[in-house]
Amino acid sequence: MEKDITLKARVFSDGSDDRYCITSSKEIALTLRNIAEKRKPVALYYGGANEFILTTLLGVDSHGLWLEQSKDHAANQKIANDDRLVVVGSHHNIKIQFPVYRPVLVEYQSHSAFFLPLPDKLFRLQRREYFRLMTPALSPLKCVIPGTDQNSNQLREITIMDISGGGIALTCAETDTELVPGKSYPDCRINLPEFGTIIGTIAVKNVAVLTDAEGKSYKRAGCELQDLDNSSIVLLHRYVLHLQRAK
């Protein structure tokens, strides 16, 4: 099963990232057709890459591609009048990004869509594009984990040390018996102040015992965020962008 890939657009400098670039029209069309078949969400950036909508790649042929329009009509008009757009998605667990131009408002298989010419280049970016951002120290984020079958009414709040588009690091006392590598916790909730609440599965990947400046030991659990719905993906993406801009 494919993992969720952060849909943040990356800024390239001219010629500096040619090693990531695909220019074969056949390979580009094949990649995009596979994404369309998977029906995974993609982000369409507009307004100088400062705004985006989460959408679906409906279809691809040798001439172009069709992206579903947003329910926000004002956003659709801005996109239709913008000739410098960027699409970000994922293909086989690798983030892909490509520029598109000359959007046209059309109907495609009973969907309101944007038709865009097939891009002449596509960038494939490895998962190292994820990087962790420290959460606010004075008011740290909390991950609320539902109780187990034996304690179904007991909720646990665990502090989040850092966050990215694909995961979080949780911290708890060294003696805490929870947060076992390989264990998953469904229906976890994370409130992102001023943005909203995301809900998904927390999969514990690794646990380390660390020591702070005062000599106290604590656990740090690296976790992957899974099973996020489209709304949660958008909220998480916006929050990570907010932390990046605040650095």
Image (spheres, rainbow, N blue to C red):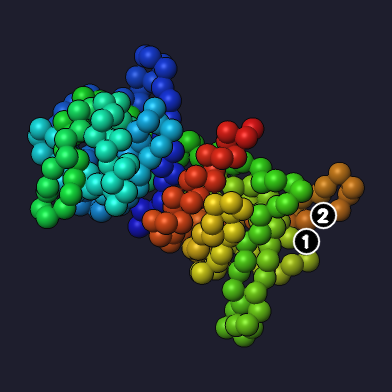
In the rendering, at what x and y percent does residue 157 appear?
68, 66
Between 170 and 77, which is closer to the camera in this rendering? 77
- Residue 51 horizontal/vertical position (percent): 41, 37
Residue shown at the point (44%, 38%) measured from the top left: 8
How many residues crowd mark 1 within 10 Å: few (<14), some (14–19), many (20+)?
some
The numbered mark at residue 174 is 1
Is residue 220 visible in the rendered structure shown here?
A: no
The answer, for residue 144, to whether it is visible in the render is yes
Quadrant of the rendering where the N terminus is positioned: bottom left
Tell me: residue 85, above or below residue 240: above
Question: Is residue 107 depicted above or below 190 in this figure?
Answer: above
Name the one closer to the observer, 5 or 52.
52
Q: Tag 1: residue type?
A: Glu
Q: Residue at x 51, y 69 (%)?
A: 187
Q: Nearer the viewer, residue 222 or 74?
A: 74
Labelled pair 1, 2 in contact (Cβ < 8 Å): yes
- Picture layout, residue 62 above or below residue 5: above
Mark closest to the chain's N terminus, 1 or 2: 1
The numbered disc on residue 217 is 2
- The quarter in which the C terminus is drawn is top right
- The disc labelled 2 sits on which kind of residue? Ser
Distance between the alpha carbons at the discs numbered 1 and 2: 6 Å
